[in-house]
Image: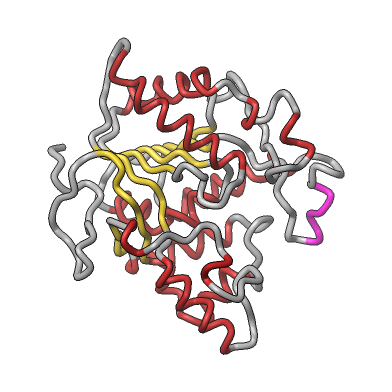
């Protein structure tokens, strides 16, 4: 399995239980993180000096956070895009000044960045690719660019050298019904979920009909929660993610959802006719 993500912590929030589950089964998992998350908001007051507006050392710190999170998930092969040959900087939120800096990921040439992923694809020959949808989940420029680069790499990888065609490609998805349940539970406790009054206020939710796969990683929730805690500068223990756990139980983080965009869905299916195994139908 190859996962392409924009910043450290994206992988754990979206796919932590999936990664831990498959790692425990002996699946080779490779994570490519496209930036070091230099423009992230620092949620730990004692580490505020790391921010890009101060010492600009957050990216270095997040390298260590990612490494710690991957230990919790049992993932040994995690790399940054370019693998030290070239570093792509975090582009910041859409419409902010960092978007226009020449070294940010948003400004990267898509084919050139994709070629770096093609090299990894030829090396590991993955059966499954996981990345974002065409809007990057919620519109962050680095998420959109990660989608573009990953999908372009999948397109290019069969065409050159040690060519390899990835049989199945999935995009991360979050069904409306799940988030709606979370919002109502948090309202009942006097809290909110990212300030949303309604599920329709959130750009990253998908109609349930568009969600075609669900991985049940509930047995790996503890590993995912530990990995989330490892990303200490980005995920506050009293923030919305852990508040959601307090209201619905941490098990909510064990169910991870996907949309199949390349390949053929195969049994086993769950009661909602969603694939239950991202590798279903594939020959090792």
Residue 216 locus on image (x, y percent): 30, 64
Chosen colour scheme? secondary structure
Judge whether residue 154 is colored magenta. no
Q: Please indicate whether residue 17 sits to the left or right of residue 41 in the image.
A: left
**Principal secondary structure, stretch drawn in magenta:** helix
At x 58% / y 19%, what residue is drawn? Answer: 85
Q: Which residue occupies the foreground of this view, 175 or 45? A: 175
Q: Is residue 200 above or below residue 90?
A: below
Quarter of the image with the C terminus is: top left
Q: Quadrant of residue 143?
A: top right
Q: Is residue 185 above or below residue 115?
A: below
Residue 69 locus on image (x, y percent): 52, 52
Residue 147 locus on image (x, y percent): 47, 37
At x 62% / y 31%, what residue is drawn? Answer: 105
Quarter of the image with the N terminus is: top left
Number of marks in picture: 0
Q: Residue furthest right?
A: 54
Residue 101 in view in this figure: yes
Q: Is residue 242 above or below residue 191?
A: above
At x 63% / y 32%, what residue is drawn? Answer: 106
Residue 144 locus on image (x, y percent): 54, 39
Residue 60 in view in this figure: no
Judge whether residue 49 is colored magenta. yes
Residue range of the region highlighted in magenta in the rendering: 45-50
Q: Please indicate whether residue 45 sits to the left or right of residue 30 in the image.
A: right
Q: Quadrant of residue 283?
A: top left
């Amino acid at each position: 399995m190859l996962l392409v993500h924009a910043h450290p912590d994206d992988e754990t929030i979206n796919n932590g239980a999936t990664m831990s589950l498959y790692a425990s089964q002996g699946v080779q998992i490779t994570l490519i993180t496209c930036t070091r998350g230099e423009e992230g908001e620092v949620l730990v007051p004692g580490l505020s000096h790391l921010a890009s507006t101060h010492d600009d050392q957050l990216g270095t710190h997040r390298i260590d956070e990612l490494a710690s999170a991957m230990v919790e998930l049992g993932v040994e092969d995690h790399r940054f895009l370019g693998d030290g040959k070239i570093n792509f900087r975090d582009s910041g939120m859409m419409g902010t000044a960092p978007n226009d800096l020449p070294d940010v990921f948003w400004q990267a040439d898509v084919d050139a960045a994709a070629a770096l992923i093609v090299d990894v694809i030829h090396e590991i020959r993955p059966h499954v690719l996981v990345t974002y949808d065409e809007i990057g989940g919620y519109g962050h420029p680095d998420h959109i660019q990660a989608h573009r680069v990953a999908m372009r790499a999948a397109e290019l990888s069969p065409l050159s050298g040690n060519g390899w065609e990835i049989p199945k490609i999935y995009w991360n998805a979050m069904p409306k019904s799940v988030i709606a349940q979370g919002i109502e539970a948090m309202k009942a406790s006097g809290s909110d979920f990212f300030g949303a009054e309604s599920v329709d206020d959130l750009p990253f939710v998908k109609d349930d009909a568009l969600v075609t796969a669900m991985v049940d990683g509930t047995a790996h929730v503890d590993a995912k929660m530990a990995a989330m805690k490892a990303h200490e500068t980005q995920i506050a223990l009293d923030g919305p993610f852990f508040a959601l756990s307090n209201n619905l139980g941490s098990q909510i983080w064990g169910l991870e959802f996907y949309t199949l965009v390349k390949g053929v869905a195969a049994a086993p299916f769950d009661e909602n006719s969603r694939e239950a195994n991202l590798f279903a139908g594939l020959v090792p």
